[in-house]
Amino acid sequence: MTRKILLLTQGHTNPHTAKTASSVIRYRPEEAVALLDNTQAGKTSGDLLGVGDKPVVSTFDEAPGCDTLLIGIAPPGGSIPKEWRPIVLEAMARGMNVVSGLHDFFTDDAEFSAAAAKHGVELTDVRKNNVRCIALRQGLDESTLRIHTVGHDCSIGKMTAALEIEAGLRRRGHDSQFIATGQTGIMVSGAGLPIDCVTADFISGATESLILENQKHKILVVEGQGSLVHPAYSGVTLGLLHGCSPHGLIFCYEYGRTEVAGYPGRKLPPVPEFIKICESMANQMQPSQTIGVVINARTASDDELERERDAMQSATGLPVVDVFRNGVEELVDAVEKLQQSRS
Amino acid sequence: MTRKILLLTQGHTNPHTAKTASSVIRYRPEEAVALLDNTQAGKTSGDLLGVGDKPVVSTFDEAPGCDTLLIGIAPPGGSIPKEWRPIVLEAMARGMNVVSGLHDFFTDDAEFSAAAAKHGVELTDVRKNNVRCIALRQGLDESTLRIHTVGHDCSIGKMTAALEIEAGLRRRGHDSQFIATGQTGIMVSGAGLPIDCVTADFISGATESLILENQKHKILVVEGQGSLVHPAYSGVTLGLLHGCSPHGLIFCYEYGRTEVAGYPGRKLPPVPEFIKICESMANQMQPSQTIGVVINARTASDDELERERDAMQSATGLPVVDVFRNGVEELVDAVEKLQQSRS
């Protein structure tokens, strides 16, 4: 059943914080109705997030017929902004279901749970899980190709790259599958596990379980998380990398980003060096090679993008694209080439 | 208050599985009374685990006066063996408190909780936590030296090395502190956090919180977990490494171990190469160097140990010791040298 989703981004309708909202608009356009943010009412998602043309409204009444409030942000730490509580309660009082990907589970919140029961609506915590799998490295089917998007920081397009490449593979008739490992990927694909929210001992095991469940497909494209040099999340990144044991890596980075977002002064290694770090850690588990590079060039002009592509192609010897402005065909070629070399 | 602890190791009184029991006997000898294992009754902890001389008994009646049953094993996955349930229930019926470091929380188990309430005893889950800290890299005091034990596999002595080195530092009058990051370390030191059991996004943040809390001391020795090439636990290892941002690393390995325990055929990198992997990942966060090597030589003769020390010293240029058979003085020297070089 298609939902009618109102995306809550109150005070945070910007591309970095509202990445969940952006992705739902991009990949579930038929379900996304509007954004709720009274500081930006009258603008559109295109104006503020650079995706789609959904209206930003300031009240529930301006988006009638919505049956679902979806929390459209992914803040570090995953807590709900205090001023959002009355908005969530109002949505439930109006009979709307609520979907959240925060670490603060709504279903564990006494006030929210009571309101949901009173109004007969559903609360869904996308990140809530009871995963308890140890990675065993048993049953991996080497005839299924495993591709994994890694990158130099959070929120730079690893999920988007994976979704776009997988769609490109399907357009060429491949039996491929996108594997979601974070709350937004799960919201847009309807499956997956929130790898950043499992118990630490089970990061690789949870990832391995996703691989084992999806080996009926011939190519898996596994969404990456964080980065191997991230001060807070590198553990998630490495456990995920080892759990999915990729044959091929796609390295993603944002044009112009030189420091870890939110950690001023913390320099990122240059891309060619960073690719070596990823390959070196991936190869501890499984022979693995980087087959392509994705630039998130949203801040670059067309000229800047082309210069960056040329420079990065020379530095790495790999195909380099912005998935929206250059398309994914060169990356799909690279996946096919890797598949052929292994068969 | 000193407890009187009966260690439950039923059917598993061997050095690998019963590592929690071994450590409690070694580091809490005044509290450990006996081991409960009716398959080994009449033997001692010295016979079976190579530590102390606590008797192994087959019934509760043979260890009168015990007020605490402590689960003495750390199985992969952290589940309780089924046949142990009646033993745990009997302990509670006899008025004993129960301490567990398993992932299966006893306090979430309806039957165990009901029995604890009925008999007025305490259930303690050492691994249960509600940690929600993001690593921020703020407030780190660079005048406190951070030492971290890393290693090539699980259960090879990273906690023991950290405890012994920290004790050696204190013997020389240093203001040092052992930082426990796993259930056994917490049980023997009475503080710390179970880093392998926090939510994945908070591995580094939980570790950082332990550092921030203990910076009143001048030297911290942080217990390591898992290994950077472990198929299941590498994420915990990297998040911990980055969260504690060590100035100095102590590399620990077991003599003769060439494969990851429990993963037949999965080769471990040679020690000198493995040290480079650890240093390379540590240096992504903080200038860091390896200052010593610990051999767990429990399966080696004295001759074999000496040959191994010579070979490893030549290969690495570092002091190499078995902490029990060679003592820790060379490692304490290395810590002092690092501290002097930074002041």
Image (cartoon, coloured by chain):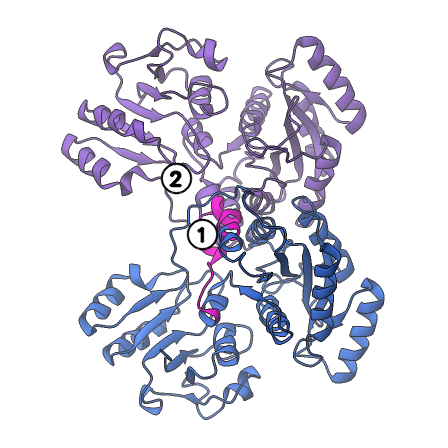
Chain colours: A blue, B purple
The three-letter code of the residue at mark 1 reads: Val
Residue extent of the magenta highlight: A189-208
Q: Quadrant of the N terminus of chain B?
A: top left
Identify the image quadrant of residue B265: top right
Number of numbered discs visible in the structure rendering:
2
Name the foreground residue: B238 vs A28.
A28
Decide: few, some or many residues near mark 2? Use Cα within 10 Å; few <14, some 14-19, many ≥20. Answer: many
**Disc 2 marks which residue?**
B103
- Residue B293: x, y in percent? 68, 27
Q: Quadrant of the C terminus of chain B?
A: top right
Q: Residue A198: which numbered mark, if any?
A: 1
- Residue A289 visible to an observer of this rendering: yes
Q: Is residue B283 placed above or below A295 in the rendered structure?
A: above
- Residue B323: x, y in percent? 61, 19
- State the residue at coordinates (21%, 37%): B111
Q: Secondary structure at mark 1?
A: loop
The three-letter code of the residue at mark 2 reads: His
Outermost residue to the left: B118
- Residue B217: x, y in percent? 54, 35
- State the residue at coordinates (49%, 34%): B180
Q: Is residue A98 placed above or below B185 in the rendered structure?
A: below
Q: Is residue A195 magenta?
A: yes
Decide: few, some or many residues near mark 1? Use Cα within 10 Å; few <14, some 14-19, many ≥20. Answer: many
Q: Chain of mark 2?
A: B
- Residue B96 visible to an observer of this rendering: no
Task: Give the alpha-carbon distance from disc 1 to disc 2, as whole Å.
Answer: 13 Å
Q: Residue A253: which numbered mark, if any?
A: none
- State the residue at coordinates (64%, 18%): B322
